[in-house]
Image (cartoon, rainbow, N blue to C red):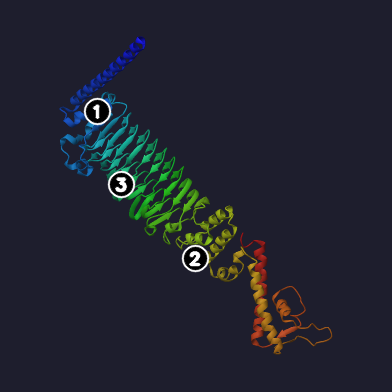
Amino acid sequence: MAHKLHIIFLLAGMIVLGSIGTSAVASDKSAKLLDLATKEFGSLSKAEQKFFRAQTNGTMADYTTGDDQKDSVDNAEWWDTTRVLRATRIAWLCRDPQASILVSDKGIQVRGVRIDEGFDVEESKITFLLYFEKCSFKDKINLRNAEIKSLYLIGTHTASIQANGLIVEKDCFLRDGFKAEGEVSLLRAKIGGDLDCSSGQFIDSAATALSGDGLKVEGAVFLYNGFNAEGEVSLRFANIGLNLECDNGVFINKGGTAIDCEGSTVKGDVFLRDDIKVEGKMDFFAATVDGYFHWRNVSDSSKASLDLRSAKLASLLDDQRSWPETGKLYLDGLMYNEISEYAPMEYHQRIDWLHRQPDSPFHPQPYEQLATVLRKSGHDDDATEILIQMQKDRGRLANPVWYQWPWYHIFGPVIAFGYRPWRSFWYAIGFISLGSIFFGIGYRKGLVVAAREKSEGYPKFNALVYSLDVFAPLIDLYQADYYLPQGKFLRFYHWFQIIAGWVLTTLLAVGLSGLVVS
């Protein structure tokens, strides 16, 4: 028992000594860093001394008072000198090799301070994270071509941020009350984790609020849950490893593009739903989405336009209420493998969807793509109706030349433009039935007479068979050649039915051959 107690006391002593040793090392680092900073900048303010000490011992440099109103970043302009740092001090700590090696592995952590002057670490390689919570950067931030382990601007207000070519090893968080008044530029930046801008505000209504052209994100991009952009959000030719989530976000760029994802690639899903508010164009021209493209529960679709031209989607999940107004939906070249079972599937709904496109120029591809997807889903009849509507709309919108007019407005509809050639059979029955009535009445009134002198074996007149013989070409039922109508009306109708017979029979033959459809 005594032996065990001896071991316990020995271990406890080692822990205490280790703690004291660690504290001594941290204290030594603090003293060394303060000495370096004093040599670099001269006398340091109390706020600066507090900042440098915290970064060596791995603690948060916390300048908050506990009073929510006083600590509000909106009131940063009135914070006194005990809550003010100069950006040059922080930048020096990031860039100076002797100083940066003294920063703990927890990185730079600051809360509730105003940072005056511009923060410039362009082309710096920063081996630790930068964490600023509820801080205020009064001038622009320059991170061009810098390398950072992680970047967290949580609830922090800034001016413009220039971070073109920035490399972030892990996550980049601009969220939870983050506010930038000026462009946040991440052109060609690379982020190894997520880009999380949830509940962030990006304000540059005269230009681009968030610029991420050529951005590469290994994780997801979150522009949701209170995200607010006044100005364009540009992610042209961006590459996103997981989802692009914009649920419940606000994207306002009146008269311009709200989100520009031209040529972008999203390996996961795109979420544009749950009361998302859009004023402007949602541009996904030539974008590739390997998962679902959600366009549902849009707050007010009348203020949005959606451009999906030449885009490639694995699956489309939308709702009719969220479809843009007529003339504000662009679908030419859009390819998708399926329409979700939770999206509108009936052909008359999807025809309404197609009719939201601009009338001119007319594009057949959206109809053909939709028909292909419906047929793959087992909706063959709906697919056929879509193709029939395509021909109707082509005749209405494509301004066909004069000699095509009869096909689109008379002959084509008779056989459903070749997709339902048997429809001509019902027209034939109508003509034959109507003819049997007219010719029957005419015979009883002496207006249908024998074409030659009657003799033994002369065919007896039958109104139905006579009408069929007149209508059907290339067959002889021993009626049409033996009786002739008299009077202007019957003669005219007789000629008309002969012509109709030739036309409908030809249409039936052509329709059955498949030549019209092909």
Residue contact between numbered discs 3 and 1, judged by CB atoms under 8 Å: no
The CA span between labels 2 and 1 is 71 Å
**Labels 2 and 3 touching (C-beta < 8 A):** no
Write down the residue under mark 1: 54
Residue that mark 3 sits on: 202
Q: CA distance from mark 2 to mark 3?
A: 42 Å
**In this view, which residue lies farthest toward the right?**
456
Task: Say what amino acid the circle numbered 3 marks.
Answer: Phe
Is disc 3 surrounded by few (<14), some (14 to 19) or many (20+) residues within 10 Å?
Answer: many
Q: Nearer the viewer, mark 3 or mark 1?
A: 1
Residue type at mark 1?
A: Ala
Number of the front mark, 2 or 1: 1
Q: CA distance from mark 3 to mark 1?
A: 30 Å
Q: Quadrant of the C terminus?
A: bottom right
Circle 2 crowding by C-alpha within 10 Å: few under 14, some 14–19, many from 20 = some
Name the residue located 26 percent from the left edge and 25 percent from the top edge: 57
Q: Earlier in the sequence, mark 3 or mark 1?
A: 1
Q: Which quarter of the picture shows residue 4?
A: top left
Q: Dot 1: what SS?
A: helix
Q: Quadrant of residue 178?
A: top left
Q: Nearer the viewer, residue 438 or 359?
A: 438
Location of residue 199 with respect to 453 vertically, above or below: above
Q: Residue furthest front?
A: 1
Could you tell me which quadrant the N terminus lies in?
top left
Mark 1 packing: few (<14 Cα in 10 Å), some, or many (20+)? many
The reply to whether residue 285 is in sight is no
Q: Which residue is mark 2?
A: 397
Q: Secondary structure at mark 2?
A: helix
Q: Residue furthest bottom?
A: 446
Name the residue: 32% across, 49% down. Answer: 229
Q: 216 left or right of 134?
A: right
